[in-house]
Every structure is written in structure tokens, then in C-alpha cells.
Amino acid sequence: MNNRTKIAVFASGNGSNFQALHEAIVEGRLDAEIVLVVTDKPDAFVVERAKQAGVPALTFLPRNFASKEQYESMLANELEKAGAEWLVLAGFMRLIGSVLLSAYENRIVNIHPSVLPAFPGKDAIGQTLAADAEVAGVTVHFVDEGMDTGAIIAQQSFPVDSQDRETVERKIHDIEHRLYPESLQQLFSRQQSV
């Protein structure tokens, strides 16, 4: 039980991926402990989900800091206090900067709702549909200084077949909620066996 990987989940919205990770931990499918939820949107629903799960939440407003370096230094300090070993981005709508990238080198993971390298950035589902892409899907990847450019860990896709946005979104969320815990479990297992 003490060998659980300690993770901080970064989110900016509803927190459905946080919920899926929490449930995977409770059900024994993910050998991790969420030690902190971090959000740049104090009114995001993920804060309520964290509270219900008994996980501390750290909220901050980037505009209250002079620079990204300043708020990332504050975050790095709080993450260290919480004992976070990995950062898990789950709908966090900000690029991670140099302070956190160096503090958590090769230990920051993101989930993105497209088959990267296609459709990085915001509204990937909208981009996928606007491009009449044949497939939609999900990518789990390491975070680097670019926007959704880090090394790919896992991907899963499905044919769009002229489905509406609501259907595509539902399928993407279903994949995310299964693929993210599975991918993290594989990563953490490898790390522990090294």
C-alpha cells in the first residue's frame, strides 16, 4: 500500500477524468494515491469532486501572479509539500512551463481528445469534426514544452462515420476514462520495477 505512486491531478473543468482516476484507485485498478488536485479555475466542478473524494484541492488564479514562473514556483512548493511524484493533467487548459517541467522531468502526463499529432490544442473534438476526419480518438502522452507534442504513451481511435458531436464526445470520454488509468498503471508499474 505504501508503494503507491503519489500523483497530483491538474484540471480546469468538470473533472470527469479525475473521477475516473479516483474510481480506478478505489477499485484497485490503479496503484496510486491522489495527493492533490490543482486547478486554475476556483469554481470548476473538479473542486467539488475532489472534496467528495476527500482529496485536498489547490486553487489559484494565474492573473494574481506576476508571471508563469511565479505561480509555477508556488505550485512546485505545494506539490513538494503534498509529496506528489507525478503530475497528471486531466483537462488542464494551460501549457506547463519550465519550472514544473524541470521539477517533474519525464513525470508529467496528459490526456488529449484526438489522435495526436492531429488536432493539438483547444477544442480537439471540434477540430476533428470540422476537418471531416475519418477517425477520432484519445492520446495519452508525456508533457514537454510544446502544445500536445510530447512522446506518445498510448492511443485509441474509432471511426467518426458522420456521428454528431455529442456521440463523438461520449465515445471519447468512455475511452479516456478507461485508457488513462490503464496507461498510468503501466507507467507506474514499469517505474517501480526499475
Image: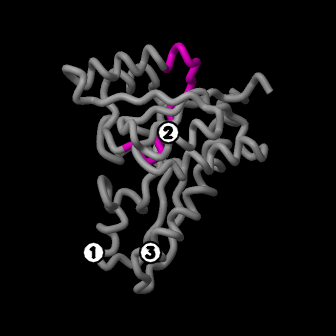
The residue closer to the viewer here, 12 or 43, is 43
**Amino acid identity at mark 3:** Glu
Q: Earlier in the sequence, mark 1 or mark 2?
A: 2
Q: Residues within 10 Å of mark 3 (few under 14, many from 20)?
A: few
Cα distance in 3D space between marks 2 and 3: 25 Å
For label 1, the residue is 130
For label 2, the residue is 47
Q: Name the residue rendered at 27%, 75% in the picture.
A: 130
Image mark for residue 185: none
**Amino acid identity at mark 1:** Ala
Q: Earlier in the sequence, mark 2 or mark 3?
A: 2
Magenta segment: 79-92
- Locate the N terminus and report the quarter of the image it occupies: top right
Secondary element at tag 2 = helix
Image mark for residue 166: 3
Q: Position of residue 95 (x, y in %)?
A: 31, 38
Q: Position of residue 85 (x, y in %)?
A: 57, 24
43 sits to left or right of 188 = left
**Amino acid identity at mark 2:** Val
Q: Earlier in the sequence, mark 3 or mark 1?
A: 1
Q: Nearer the viewer, mark 3 or mark 1?
A: 3
Cα distance in 3D space between marks 1 and 2: 32 Å
61 sits to left or right of 110 = left
Mark 1 and 2 residues: CB-CB less than 8 Å, in contact?
A: no
Tag count? 3
Q: Name the residue rendered at 63%, 57% in the picture.
A: 178
Give the image quarter of residue 3.
top right
Say if the magenta span includes residue 86. yes
